[in-house]
Amino acid sequence: MSNAALSAIRTQVMWNRLIAVVEEQAQSLLRTAFGTITREAGDLSAGVYDPDGNMIAQAMTGTPGHVNTMATAVAHFFKHYPRPTMQPGDVYATNDPWLGTGHLFDYVVMTPVFLGKKLVAFFASTCHVIDVGGVGMTAKANSSFEEGTLIPHMKMRDKGRLNEDLFKIVLANSRNPVEVRGDLLSLISANDTGARRLIDMMREFKLASIVPLAKHILTQSEKGAREAIKQLPEGAWSYDMPLDGYEKPIVIKSKLTIKRGKITIDFTGSSPASIHGINSPRTYTHAYSVFGLKAVIAPHVPNNIGSLSCFDLVTEPGTCVDPIRPSPVTARHVIGQMLADCVFGCLAQALPGKVQAESAGSIWIMGLNSAHGLVPASETANAKSFGVISIALGGIGGRPGKDGLATTAFPSGVGAIPIEVTESQCPLWFKRKQYLVDSGGAGEFRGGLSQAIEIANSEPAPFTISAATFDRIRNAAQGRDGGKPGRKGLARLGSGKPLPDKGIHVIPAGDSLVVELPGGGGFGDPAKRARIMIETDLKSDLVSPEAAQREYEFDRR
């Protein structure tokens, strides 16, 4: 075997090893985090960067909204802390929405790595902490100042010593200080784990620097993405997506241009920023729109700064996809997580028959709290005070050749929090959690089913639900290539009264909360659906006999 072949094999082994390092980094965070949304739902990300701050590898565990925003977030630290001033044991952090992951609940924590006295790499990680003060996990704020405590780029650890003054400020402004401290320490620990493993790897392979390896990874990734782009037709395509909004409906306007091996997604003309916290900062808009492009065009290419550099984003400052400080942004994924589907709407015109139908999009983060302070004191006099989060997931759109996945987060990729975990933290209990029959849009390949969830209080007291992230209640996920829309979402009291908007709603004592998530759109003409697939749906109670007759003209007789 030639020396060139042996060198190529060695390089690939080191690349694979680097991915294993960031996976262990992510698993460290997953297994030590205090917040359930991190340790149970996997709402996190982890990555390694070269000495110039270029993201070269990311963990598979995590979300595009975290990973892709971190690709650019690390560079912002260098403006405040030049690299020559960094020392072994230092750790830096911020939760600035415009320079991080889009809202105050996510801390980006960055750790420089030293081999001896030489700075050789950076590790960064992020996760959603449960409370940062302010109005909490709601969209009712009218500015980011009301949404919680913003920590600018600061040292969280100085040469191995924790900045306890910083921790005091963060914890004094949180309703859940124990959990928040635990999560921040877990982020530090995860980066330390990655750093130790990287140094072990460098010593094993006798590397004085990872720069040559990083250059190879980024060059090959960019090459792979650009080769995939060259296979696409040139042209421009537009797609408008209506969303429920908050105080008024929102329209996301997108235009995709493919020209000379370059792709640009342009959101100019989208609705102005909302006065409530559903706006998506540009960093978050970039994360999910680029994810949508890459998921269709180059899914086989590793996700790093090399492949991401092949896509350009154009936004209009002051719009809901590029809000200006201090616009409120807590529930930014209401808009941000819809952008992949918006991009798909453009790509479907360029690549007919090859792009999946629309999905539920925005995950419904259910902020469940005791009603203390929102109802007369006599109604909560003997009730337990609590605040928990539950994750509700809708359906994914039908795909070319496959049905959409049921109750699966897309494009965020987070999981649900087990109901047993939530019930162990508070007096609430889940009366039911089940597939919602007929919720997936009809098509040759059916949209993914959503679910119905009903929650009640075991105590004779009211509780509250923050509906900040509920969407597709008025605008269903659309089908593709002849497929039908998925079922719209719904939120109501068990007694029947609808919950009309994204505000905070009181669930009266003795009543219950019912949410029905949006279903995915169908793909392809329903008349072409295979009979055996319809029969299987009927046997599995995924589609009712009435819907089978109505949508597919199918009769069991």
Image: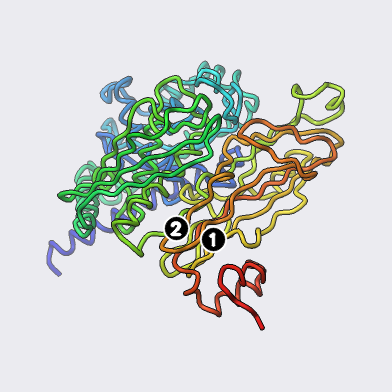
Q: What residue do we see at 33% from left, 19% from top?
A: 80
Q: Which residue is denoted by mark 2 in the rendering?
A: 357
Q: Do the numbered discs 2 and 1 sit on residues whose CB atoms are within 8 Å?
A: yes
Q: Nearer the viewer, residue 344 or 365?
A: 344
Residue 230 image point, x, y percent: 19, 56
The reply to whether residue 312 is visible in this rendering is yes
Q: Quadrant of residue 428?
A: top right
Q: What residue do we see at 65% from left, 25% from top?
A: 175
Against 298, residue 66 (above or below) is: above
Residue 100 image point, x, y percent: 41, 30
Mark 1: give few (<14), some (14-19) or many (20+) Cα within 10 Å: many
Against 548, residue 181 (above or below) is: above
On screen, residue 244 versus residue 506, left or right, reads left
Identify the amino acid type marked 2. Ala
- Secondary structure under tag 1 reads loop
Q: How was the colour assigned to the protein in this rendering?
A: rainbow
Q: What residue do we see at 48% from left, 47% from top?
A: 412
Mark 2: give few (<14), some (14-19) or many (20+) Cα within 10 Å: many
Residue 256 image point, x, y percent: 28, 46
- Secondary structure under tag 2 reads loop
Identify the amino acid type marked 1. Gly
The reply to whether residue 22 is visible in this rendering is no
Q: Label for residue 441? A: 1
